[in-house]
C-alpha cells in the first residue's frame, strides 16, 4: 500500500505516510453539484472497445479534469502525479490510480470523441443553470486559436461529417502564422463569466462563420430567443444580423472600420460638431494617477445599411492611444525614409522612379501614407577632378564634374492629421435593440440607451480573460497528441475545466458580496485580493496533506491533518465544502 505514497517516514517501528489533499475537495464538490459523474457515465459508458475496462473511461476523464485544474501534467505523468494523493477525492480507488497510463487515458479520449458534445454540454449547462442559478439573459462569444506544430496528415481524407476539426493554417491569434491551429469558440454568460457553450472549428475557419451555430445552441439551451448576444465585429455581417433578428433575438456588435457607415460618420465628424454626451466614467485602467477614462455617446439618425441602430462612442483612453499610434507611425516612416536617402555605393538608387517606389512602399508598410507625402528629386553636387596622373601642383589642371544624388523631401499633411485627430477614440456599435424613443412591440426586449449598450459590451473583456486563462493558467497543450480525434476530445476536457474554474470563482465572489467581505489576503505576502480567481483560491490549499501513523505491521494508529491557514478556512466556509475533508469539525 505504501508504494503509492510519496512521503513515507519510518521511526522506532512506526511509519508516517502522507497523502496530499490540496484543493481536490473543492473540485469534487462542484463536480457533485454538476452531476458530472452521472453524465460521464451515461455518455462515455463503462466499456472500452467492446469489453469492460478495469478502469471506466468516465473515471479516467474525471481524473484528467483534476489534473488540468491542479497540475497540468502530461498524459504519461498522470499516474505518477496521482501517487501521494488522497485518491478518494478524485473518485478512484488506490488500485485504479495505478492504472492511469497514457495509453488508457488516450483510449478514454477516443471514447469521449465518439459522444455528441452538443447534447453532453446542453445537459451539463442546464444542470449548472439550475444548481447555481445562472442568468442567461446576456451572452458573450469570442474565439481564440490553439496552436500546433507537426504534419497531422490525412485529415482531409476522412468524411467531413465524421472527421475531427482540421488542424491547419489560418489567422493565428498567437501571432504564429508559421504554425497550424484550431479555432476554439467559447461562449459565456454575463453572470460570473461562466462558460455555457464551446465548439472547436477547422483552423482556417473565420469568426463570421461561427455565430449562427453558436446562437442556435444558446437558444436551445435557454428554450427561447429572448437574450442579448454580444460579439466582436465578425458578427456584423448581413447574414448573421438578419438571422438573429429574424428569429426574434437581440444582438450587439462592433461596427467594422471597413464599413461605409464608418467612413460617412467620420466625414460628418470632420465637417460638423457632434453633441456628444458623457455615458461612462471610470478610473484610468492602466494608471490611477492619470485622468479618468471617459466615454461619450451619440446616436446619429442614420441606421446601418441593414436598418439597425448604430450608436457612436468616443473613448478618452482610445483617443490617447490613437494619437500615440499616429505619432509613432509617422516617426517610424520618417526614420526609414532617412535610411533610404542615406544609401550609398551598390545600394544607392539608380533612378528617381525606383526611389519613389521604395518610399511609397515604406509609407504603405508603416500605415502612414495618409499623413505623409514623399517626393523624390534628383539634384547634383559639383566637384573638380584632376587631369592626368601625379601629385597636384601649381600647373595641375582640373575639370569640373557633377555627381547626381537623390533628395527625399518628406512633408506632413497637416490638414489631414488635424481632421483625423477629430476622430481619435471613435468606434461604433450596431444593435437591433430598440431605442428609448421607439415604440416597443409586445414580446420585444426593453429599450436600451447608449449608456446601457456600452455597459453590456464592456463585459466582453471577461470572456477574453477566460480564453487567456485557457492558455496561461490551464496551459492548454494538446499538441502532444498525435491523433486529431484525441485533440478534439482533450479540448472538450479543457472546456469542462474552464467551466469548473468559473463556477468556483463565481461562488466565492457571490458569497463575499453577500457577507460583506471586501477582499481576501490571497496574493503573495498576504496582499489583499478583491476579486479572487480559482488560481489563487487553489494556492491557499497547496501542500495540505493528510498523514497516517502506522505500526510495524502496517496497521493504522492515528490520522493527522495539516493545519489550514485562516484564509483557507474562510474559503471552505464560503464554498460550503465539507470541513471533514480537511480534518475539521
Image (cartoon, grey):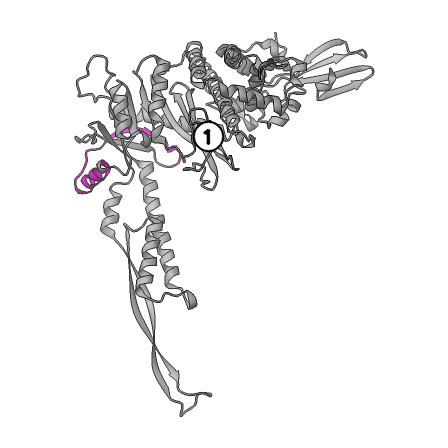
Instruction: Give the residue at mark 1.
Output: 468
The picture places residue 569, in percent across and down from the top left corner, at: 57, 15
Left or right of 382, for residue 584: right
Label 1 CA crowd tier, 10 Å (few <14, some 14–19, many 20+): some
Residue 478, position as x, y percentages in the image: 53, 29
Report helix, strand or loop for mark 1. Answer: helix
Q: Is residue 52 above or below residue 67?
A: above
Choose top left, top right, bottom left or bottom right for residue 289: top left
- Which quarter of the figure is the C terminus placed in? top right
Q: Is residue 477 above or below residue 45?
A: below
Furthest residue in direction right, as rendered: 12
Instruction: Check the picture and name the quadrant holding the N terminus.
Output: top right
Look at the image and tell me whether residue 234 can be seen.
Answer: yes
Along the line of sight, the residue nearer the viewer: 67 or 277: 67
Please say if 411 is above or below 551. below
Please give the range of residues in magenta: 261-289
Task: Establish if 536 lies above or below 43.
Answer: below
Specify the quadrant of the image occupied by residue 480.
top right
Q: Does the rendering let one see residue 282?
A: no
Tell me the residue at 40%/23% (across/down): 187
Q: How many marks?
A: 1
Q: Is residue 282 magenta?
A: yes
Residue drawn at point x = 41 percent, y = 91 percent: 394
Q: Residue at x 23, y 19 (%)?
A: 447
List x then y, in percent, for residue 151. 52, 37
Which residue is found at the position 28% from the left and 38% from the top? 257
Q: Residue 62 versus residue 213: which sits nearer the camera?
A: 213
Picture quadrant of residue 298:
top left
Residue that extends furthest to the top in the rendered view of this protein: 585
Residue 304 belongs to magenta span: no
Amino acid at each position: 500500500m505504501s508504494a503509492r505514497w510519496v512521503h513515507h517516514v519510518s521511526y522506532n517501528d512506526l511509519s508516517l505516510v502522507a497523502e496530499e489533499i490540496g484543493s481536490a475537495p473543492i473540485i469534487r464538490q462542484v463536480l457533485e453539484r454538476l452531476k458530472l459523474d452521472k453524465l460521464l457515465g451515461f455518455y462515455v459508458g463503462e466499456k472500452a472497445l467492446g469489453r469492460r475496462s478495469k478502469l471506466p473511461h468516465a473515471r479516467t476523464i474525471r481524473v484528467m479534469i483534476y489534473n488540468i485544474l491542479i497540475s497540468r501534467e502530461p498524459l504519461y505523468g498522470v499516474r505518477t502525479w496521482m501517487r501521494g494523493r488522497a485518491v478518494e477525492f478524485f473518485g478512484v480507488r488506490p488500485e485504479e490510480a495505478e492504472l492511469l497510463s497514457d495509453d488508457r487515458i488516450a483510449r478514454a479520449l477516443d471514447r469521449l470523441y465518439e459522444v455528441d458534445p452538443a447534447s453532453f454540454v446542453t445537459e451539463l449547462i442546464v444542470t449548472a443553470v439550475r444548481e447555481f442559478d445562472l442568468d442567461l439573459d446576456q451572452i458573450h462569444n469570442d474565439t481564440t486559436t490553439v496552436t500546433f506544430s507537426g504534419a497531422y496528415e490525412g485529415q482531409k481524407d476522412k468524411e467531413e461529417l465524421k472527421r475531427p476539426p482540421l488542424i491547419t493554417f489560418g489567422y493565428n491569434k498567437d501571432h504564429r502564422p508559421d504554425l497550424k491551429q484550431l479555432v476554439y469558440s467559447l461562449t459565456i454568460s454575463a453572470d460570473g463569466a461562466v462558460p455555457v457553450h464551446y465548439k472547436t472549428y477547422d483552423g482556417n475557419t473565420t469568426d463570421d462563420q461561427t455565430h449562427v451555430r453558436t446562437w442556435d445552441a444558446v437558444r436551445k439551451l435557454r428554450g427561447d430567443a429572448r437574450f442579448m448576444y454580444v460579439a466582436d465585429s465578425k458578427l456584423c455581417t448581413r447574414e448573421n444580423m438578419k438571422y438573429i433578428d429574424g428569429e426574434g433575438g437581440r444582438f450587439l456588435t462592433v461596427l467594422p472600420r471597413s464599413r461605409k457607415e464608418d467612413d460617412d460618420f467620420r466625414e460628418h465628424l470632420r465637417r460638423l460638431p457632434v453633441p456628444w454626451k458623457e455615458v461612462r466614467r471610470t478610473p484610468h485602467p492602466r494608471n490611477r494617477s492619470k485622468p479618468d477614462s471617459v466615454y461619450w455617446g451619440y446616436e446619429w439618425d442614420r441606421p446601418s445599411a441593414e436598418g439597425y441602430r448604430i450608436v457612436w462612442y468616443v473613448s478618452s483612453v482610445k483617443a490617447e492611444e490613437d494619437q500615440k499610434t499616429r505619432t509613432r507611425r509617422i516617426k517610424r516612416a520618417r526614420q526609414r525614409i532617412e535610411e533610404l536617402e542615406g544609401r550609398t555605393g551598390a545600394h544607392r538608387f539608380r533612378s528617381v522612379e525606383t526611389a519613389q517606389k521604395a518610399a511609397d512602399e515604406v509609407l504603405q508598410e508603416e500605415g502612414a501614407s495618409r499623413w505623409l507625402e514623399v517626393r523624390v528629386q534628383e539634384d547634383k553636387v559639383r566637384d573638380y577632378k584632376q587631369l592626368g596622373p601625379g601629385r597636384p601642383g601649381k600647373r595641375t589642371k582640373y575639370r569640373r564634374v557633377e555627381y547626381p544624388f537623390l533628395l527625399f523631401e518628406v512633408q506632413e499633411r497637416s490638414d489631414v492629421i488635424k481632421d483625423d485627430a477629430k476622430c481619435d477614440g471613435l468606434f461604433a456599435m450596431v444593435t437591433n435593440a430598440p431605442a428609448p424613443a421607439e415604440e416597443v412591440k409586445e414580446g420585444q426586449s426593453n429599450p436600451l440607451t447608449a449608456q446601457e449598450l456600452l455597459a453590456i459590451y464592456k463585459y466582453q473583456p471577461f470572456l477574453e480573460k477566460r480564453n487567456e486563462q485557457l492558455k496561461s493558467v490551464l496551459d492548454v497543450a494538446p499538441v502532444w497528441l498525435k491523433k486529431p480525434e484525441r485533440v478534439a476530445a482533450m479540448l472538450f476536457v479543457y472546456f469542462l475545466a474552464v467551466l469548473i474554474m468559473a463556477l468556483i470563482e463565481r461562488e466565492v465572489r457571490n458569497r463575499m458580496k453577500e457577507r460583506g467581505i471586501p477582499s481576501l489576503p490571497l496574493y503573495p505576502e498576504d496582499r489583499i485580493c478583491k476579486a479572487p480567481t480559482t488560481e489563487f483560491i487553489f494556492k491557499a490549499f497547496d501542500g495540505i496533506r493528510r498523514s497516517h501513523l502506522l505500526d510495524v505491521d502496517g496497521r493504522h494508529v492515528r490520522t493527522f491533518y495539516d493545519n489550514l491557514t485562516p484564509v483557507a478556512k474562510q474559503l471552505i466556509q464560503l464554498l460550503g465544502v465539507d470541513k471533514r475533508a480537511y480534518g475539521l469539525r
